[in-house]
Image (tube, rainbow, N blue to C red):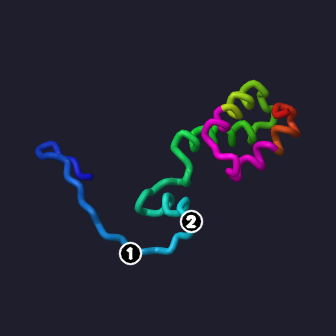
């Protein structure tokens, strides 16, 4: 999309070369979509918060439980992040 003060916005479409990207989630991370991952933007924000929780030495259990509730709303049951999150949560005692 091009924006100019003196004219209406314009859209220019360009044909891209076909690339084999595998499963559908990989397409979302291609140049065509320019996403960091195949997750929603909301899920990415909560995952960032969750990563901060996991990287602190002394985890605030109330904060971790709040982040856990948000993760449960936004991530699928098979998301790879759950393995790490559940391992640390059970070890730290804020996931029971």
Q: Is residue 23 left or right of residue 91?
A: left
Q: Which quadrant of the structure image shows residue 63? A: top right
Q: Position of residue 55 (x, y in %)?
A: 74, 41
Q: Residue at x 75, y 40 (%)?
A: 54
- Toward the front, the furthest residue is 77
- Which secondary structure class fits the magenta region best? helix
Tag of residue 95: none
Image quarter of the C terminus = top right
Q: Residue at x 68, y 31 (%)?
A: 69
Q: Position of residue 74 (x, y in %)?
A: 60, 40
In magenta, the rendered stretch is 70-86
Q: Position of residue 95 (x, y in %)?
A: 82, 34
Q: Position of residue 36 (x, y in %)?
A: 53, 54
Marks 1/2: CA–CA distance: 18 Å
Q: Is residue 24 left or right of residue 66?
A: left
> Which SS class for mark 1?
loop
- Toward the left, the furthest residue is 6
- Of the image marks 1 and 2, the number of the one nearer the N terminus: 1
Q: Is residue 76 left or right of residue 58?
A: left
Residue under pointer 1: 17
Q: Residue at x 70, y 53 (%)?
A: 80
> Which SS class for mark 2?
loop
Q: Residue at x 23, y 52 (%)?
A: 2
Magenta stretch containing residue 4, yes or no? no
Tag of residue 23: 2
Q: Can you tell which of label 1 and label 2 is closer to the viewer?
A: 2
In the image, is residue 14 above or below residue 77?
A: below
């Amino acid at each position: 999309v091009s924006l100019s003060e003196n004219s209406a916005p314009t859209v220019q479409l360009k044909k891209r070369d076909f690339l084999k990207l595998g499963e559908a989630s990989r397409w979302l991370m291609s140049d065509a979509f320019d996403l960091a991952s195949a997750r929603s933007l909301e899920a990415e924000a909560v995952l960032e918060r969750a990563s901060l929780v996991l990287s602190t030495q002394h985890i605030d259990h109330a904060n971790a439980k709040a982040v856990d509730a948000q993760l449960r709303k936004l991530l699928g049951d098979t998301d790879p992040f759950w393995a790490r999150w559940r391992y640390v949560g059970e070890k730290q005692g804020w996931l029971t």
